[in-house]
Image (tube, rainbow, N blue to C red):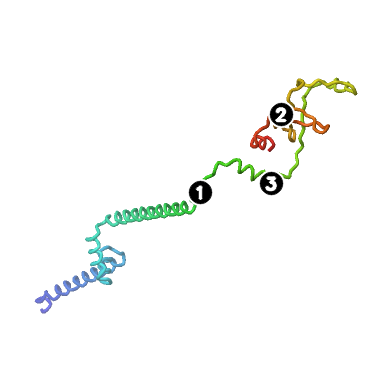
Amino acid sequence: MDETMNPTGDENEEIESIGGSESESTENEEVLGAESGTPDAAGAADEETDPSGGIDSLGLDEQFPQGAGDNDGSSASEEDIDNLLQAAAELGVLDDSENNSLSEVKTVEFPQLVNSHRAGEGANLELLYDVQLPIAVELGRAQMDISEILDLGPGSVVELDKMAGESVDLLVNGVNIGKGEVVVVDEQFGIRITHLLSPRDRVQKLA
């Protein structure tokens, strides 16, 4: 009688069993979602473990949009490179200027020379005053073949290229420095100078 009159008891039990199975399936889905690493579960777990992380990420995203950070970083690095290159170039210029300043050659200032050749020659010749040089007087010259030279002997006459009474050459160390006339001094031949080079020309010829 009671079972027939109160059918709602069985219905309530069925509803409770269905509700329990639904709650169990929901819990299983949440566990599986957390294990599989779904975005919703991972985000929720991150927010629970680090609540400040979500706030920081939102703030950074608002201040620096996606892609802007990369562009700013690249431009900053290029500016740094340009600054470094400019600084290196300036240092190189400074080093070159220092090297140039060190390698500068000072000009030597010479005193003004006085045109006094005679005084200079006299001072230089004083060192040579005691040097003896051979002096010769040349009456004339001639050219002969070897056969003629071999035929020469006592009494042979050699014809010279100068005329009688013509000036003879005065040779010092084999160099012609003047002309003169042949004279006899105390039964010895001598020469009276009629033409003589200047001291400068003599020094240049004898040098």
Residue receiving disc 2: 179
Q: CA distance from mark 1 to mark 3?
A: 29 Å
Report if the CB atoms under discs 2 and 3 are less than 8 Å apart.
no
Amino acid type assigned to the residue bearing label 3 in the image: Leu
Give the answer, above or below, for where 113 lies relative to 21.
above
Image quarter of residue 162: top right
Number of the label disc, if any, that sits on residue 131: none
How packed mark 3 is, by other alpha carbons closer than 10 Å (few <14, some 14-19, many 20 or more), is few
Which residue appears at 24% of the width and 71% of the height?
24
Numbered tag placed on residue 127 in the rendering: 3
- The first of marks 2 and 3 along the sequence is 3
Residue at image mark 1: 109
- Measured in 3D between alpha carbons, the distance from the residue under mark 2 to the one under mark 1, in whole angstroms, is 46 Å
Name the N-terminal-most of marks 1 and 3. 1
Q: Residue furthest front?
A: 186
- The image shows residue 113 at horizontal and vertical percentages of 54, 44
What x and y, as percent, mark residue 36?
31, 64
Label 1 residue SS: loop
Q: Where, quadrant-wise, is the N terminus in this rendering?
A: bottom left
Instruction: Specify the amino acid type for callout 1.
Output: Glu
The residue mark sitting in front, 2 or 3, is 2
Distance between the Cα atoms at labels 2 and 3? 27 Å
Looking at the image, residue 169 lies above or below residue 199: above
Residue 45 picture location, percent across and down: 27, 69
Q: Does label 2 or label 1 sit earlier along the sequence?
A: 1
Q: Is residue 191 left or right of residue 97?
A: right
Report x, y in % for residue 52.
25, 70
Number of residues whose C-alpha sits closer than 10 Å to that of mark 1, classed few (under 14), some (14–19) or many (20 or more):
few
Instruction: Provide the secondary structure element on which disc 3 rests.
Output: helix
Quadrant for the C terminus in the image = top right
Amino acid identity at mark 2: Lys
- Label 2–label 1 contact, CB within 8 A: no
